[in-house]
Image (spheres, rainbow, N blue to C red):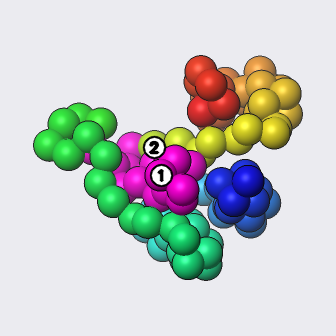
């Protein structure tokens, strides 16, 4: 599935390691470039006009990445266990949501 491949590329690039608020802009730009490497990726806006408004990236009509000024949400279908371990070790930095988010 293309979404999984793209999410793996984004997750493996290491852009979130040691990120501070000062670096947030460059992180967003780097994620955008990585996400757009695949010609099938569409960039849009999710939840426009609300507190949850974010830039969304999707392929095959399925979102895999949401980026806002407050948070990053990445779909991690095949690495849920690893993400849960990170969240347990650093709960202030990582959070695992429902359905692989």
In this picture, is 55 found above or below 78?
Answer: below
Residue 31: x %, y % from top left: 56, 66
Labelled disc at residue 81:
none
Q: Quadrant of residue 70?
A: top left
Per the image, the residue denoted by label 1 is: 61
**Are the residues tagged 2 and 1 within 8 Å (C-beta)?**
no
Q: Quadrant of residue 45?
A: bottom left
Q: Nearer the viewer, mark 2 or mark 1?
A: 1
Residue 47: x %, y % from top left: 26, 40
Q: Is residue 65 visible?
A: no
Q: CA distance from mark 2 to mark 1?
A: 22 Å
Q: Residue at x 44, y 66 (%)?
A: 42
Mark nearer the N terminus (2 vs 1): 1
Q: Residue at x 85, y 34 (%)?
A: 82
Q: Which residues are magenta?
A: 53-70
Residue 29: x %, y % from top left: 48, 73
Judged from this view, the residue extending furthest toward the left is: 49
Q: Secondary structure at mark 2?
A: loop
Q: Nearer the viewer, residue 44 or 87?
A: 44
> Does 22 appear in magenta?
no
Number of other residues with Cα within 10 Å of mark 1, as a class: few under 14, some 14 to 19, many 20 or more: few
Q: Residue at x 52, y 47 (%)?
A: 62
Q: Secondary structure at mark 1?
A: loop
Q: Quadrant of the C terminus?
A: top right
Per the image, the residue denoted by label 2 is: 71
In this picture, is 9 found above or below 48?
Answer: below
Dominant SS type (magenta): strand
Q: How many marks?
A: 2
Number of other residues with Cα within 10 Å of mark 2, as a class: few under 14, some 14 to 19, many 20 or more: few
Q: Residue at x 30, y 36 (%)?
A: 52
Q: Nearer the viewer, residue 39 or 84?
A: 39
């Amino acid at each position: 599935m293309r979404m999984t491949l793209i999410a793996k590329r984004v997750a493996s690039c290491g852009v979130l390691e040691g990120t501070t608020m000062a670096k947030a802009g460059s992180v967003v730009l780097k994620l955008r470039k990585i996400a757009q490497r695949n010609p099938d990726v569409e960039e849009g806006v999710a939840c426009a006009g609300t507190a949850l408004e974010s830039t969304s990236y999707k392929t095959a009509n399925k979102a895999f990445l949401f980026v806002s000024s407050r948070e990053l949400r990445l779909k991690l279908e095949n690495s849920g266990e690893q993400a849960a371990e990170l969240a347990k070790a650093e709960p202030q930095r990582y959070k695992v949501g429902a359905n692989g988010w």
